[in-house]
Amino acid sequence: VTRPVSHAPPPPLRSPLVVYRYHAAAVTHATPRALLLRHRTAALEAAVLSAHPSWARFTIWGAGRDGRDFFKAMSEDGKRRVAAFCDVDPKKIGSKYIYEAHRVPIVHFREAQPPFVLCVALGRTGGAFEANVTSLGLREGLDYYHFC
């Protein structure tokens, strides 16, 4: 049985996927970063990537450590759905990210197609990253989700 595919954007999330509460005795201080990454990635896959047909293919914004770690933490189905990584680093653009059987092209952010999972930390680029996202007229919760 085939169902018609809706290309409508996913509705914005009404609440955060994950909420951290910081205190000195927090268990997160003893929880490995890789474990937290796997849980956060699984939550994003379940709530966004798998739940909305408009996310059948998507781009990971950021071909650095955080973007690559996000890719590695995804399910095999999630990895197959990554159309590209995008970045601004001329050394990365035009190459491919190779991980196991996956070969994902890295393109300039202006050549990339939404939707995006943003894997770049805010406040670390002197506003350049934020300006690039704004320049594309993207809507958070529809065209992108910020992961880092």
Image (cartoon, rainbow, N blue to C red):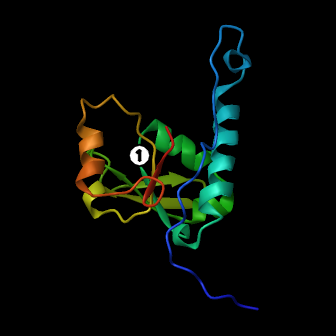
Residue at the (68%, 48%) spot, across then down? 42
Give the residue at x 34% y 62%.
Answer: 112
Residue 118 position, x and y percent, is: 44, 47
Within the image, what quadrant is residue 79 found in?
bottom right
Which secondary structure lies at badge 1?
A: loop
Check disc 1: other Cα within 10 Å, few if <14, some if 14-19, many if 20+.
many
User: Would you say residue 101 is visible in this rendering?
Assistant: no
Residue reaching furthest top? Answer: 24
Q: In terms of depth relative to the viewer, which is nearer, 71 or 136? A: 136
Height in image: 124 above or below 75?
Answer: above
State whether residue 129 is above or below residue 57: above
Q: Residue at x 60, y 42 (%)?
A: 16
Q: Position of residue 109 (x, y in %)?
A: 30, 55
Q: Which residue is mark 1?
A: 63
State the image coordinates of residue 38 (x, y, percent, origin top left).
68, 41
Which one is nearer the viewer's eye here, 9 or 87? Answer: 9
Foreground pick, 13 / 66: 13
Q: Is residue 123 left or right of residue 18?
A: left
Q: Image quadrant for the N terminus?
A: bottom right
Judge left or right: residue 64 versus residue 88.
right
Image location of residue 83, percent across then percent down: 46, 65
Which residue ends up furthest to the bottom in the rendered image? Answer: 1
Q: Is residue 36 above or below residue 138?
A: above
Q: Amino acid at mark 1?
A: Ala
Q: What residue lies at 27% left-to-right and 50% top-to-bottom?
A: 134
Left or right, 94 with respect to 37, comes to left
